Image (tube, rainbow, N blue to C red):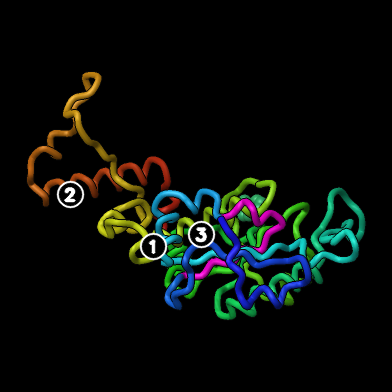
Amino acid sequence: MAHVPTSEDQALPSGASLRREGAGSQCTAWRVTVLTLFPEMFPGPLGRSLTGQALTAGLWSLDTVPIRAFGIGRHRAVDDSPAGGGAGMVMRPDVIAAAVDQARTTSADAPVIYLSPRGAPFTQSMASEFARGPGLTLLAGRFEGIDERVITARNLIEVSIGDYVLSGGELAAMVVVDACLRLIPGVLGAAASLEEESFEGGLLEYPQFTKPRTWEGLPTPDVLQSGDHAKIATWRRAESVRLTTERRPDLLKPRKR
Ligand code: ADE
């Protein structure tokens, strides 16, 4: 997508440009800023389907801040070897801080999330909370991670999308943004589909069926043909409880929030 120059460009170091996708000029847009070494990865899948249409419609905006632009020296170095030795490279705190500070000049009140397998597990309730706010600034790290001092000094909120290690934070940032976007009014067509789906009531979603009535000898459950909406709701609830008990009993335990 074409780069639309903005006044924000001036604040960046020479050669750097803050890229904006979508209409994004409405002050009501939910504002996403991604700090990354790979700005060309965005919007990626977020530019497709419903989230893509919402981006074009200006329901949310996307800026990318290229971390490399804040790199040090002729080679724009963004990382260095770990203090104390060890494998891999660590992203420098001065470089990350400069990128975060740049993002804060245009998106002062959005929480700044650092995607990390060490972070708090991302949940549906976190998505709801973020979706109610002004937007998110997301820092996608690479290598062995970022210098601990910048996490503290810039109050970064560490968030993990699961107990596995990705090769960088970009895919995790997309996951977080997607889960938030679909909660933003107007992004999904039917709001009703939100109310009943997995996790909204702390349960997994009940099984869904459609036509044909019988497929490969397998009929859809009779109750769904009954036309009795109360009976259907009771059946669905029982199925949700059954599936949650079988697959995710942890969701049924009362949780501290
Ligand atoms: N970066 C690398 N792995 C990650 C994970 N599991 N969650 C969030 N960010 C990550």
Residue 43 can be seen in this image: yes
Residue at the far top in the pictured view: 217
Q: Which residues are magenta?
A: 30-42
Mark 3 or 1, nearer chain start: 3
Residue located 60% across and 56% down the image: 160
Which residue is the site of mark 3? 177
Comes first in the chain, label 1 or label 2: 1
Q: Which residue is pictured at 57% across the width and 65% down the height? A: 20
Name the residue type under label 3.
Val
Mark 1 residue type: Leu
Of marks 2 and 3, which one's residue comes earlier in the chain?
A: 3
The residue beneath circle 2 is: 234
Q: Residue at x 66, y 71 (%)?
A: 156
Which element is circle 3 on?
A: helix
Q: In whole angstroms, how far apart are the C-alphas of marks 2 and 3? A: 33 Å
For residue 32, side relative to residue 251 (left or right): right
The quadrant the N terminus occupies is: bottom right
- CB under 8 Å between discs 3 and 1: no
Q: Is residue 206 rendered magenta in the image?
A: no
For mark 1, what is the residue? 183
239 in relation to 199, above or below = above
Task: Find out if the beta carbon at label 1 lies less than 8 Å from the nearest ligand 1 atom.
Answer: no
* C-alpha gap between disc 1 and disc 2: 26 Å
Can I make out residue 257 in this image? no
* Amino acid type, callout 2: Thr
| Contact between labelled residues 3 and 2, with CB atoms less than 8 Å apart | no
Viewer-nearest of discs 1 and 2: 1
The answer to the question of whether label 1 and label 2 lie on touching residues, with beta carbons closer than 8 A, is no
In whole angstroms, how far apart are the C-alphas of marks 3 and 1? 10 Å
Q: Position of residue 105 (x, y in %)?
A: 64, 80
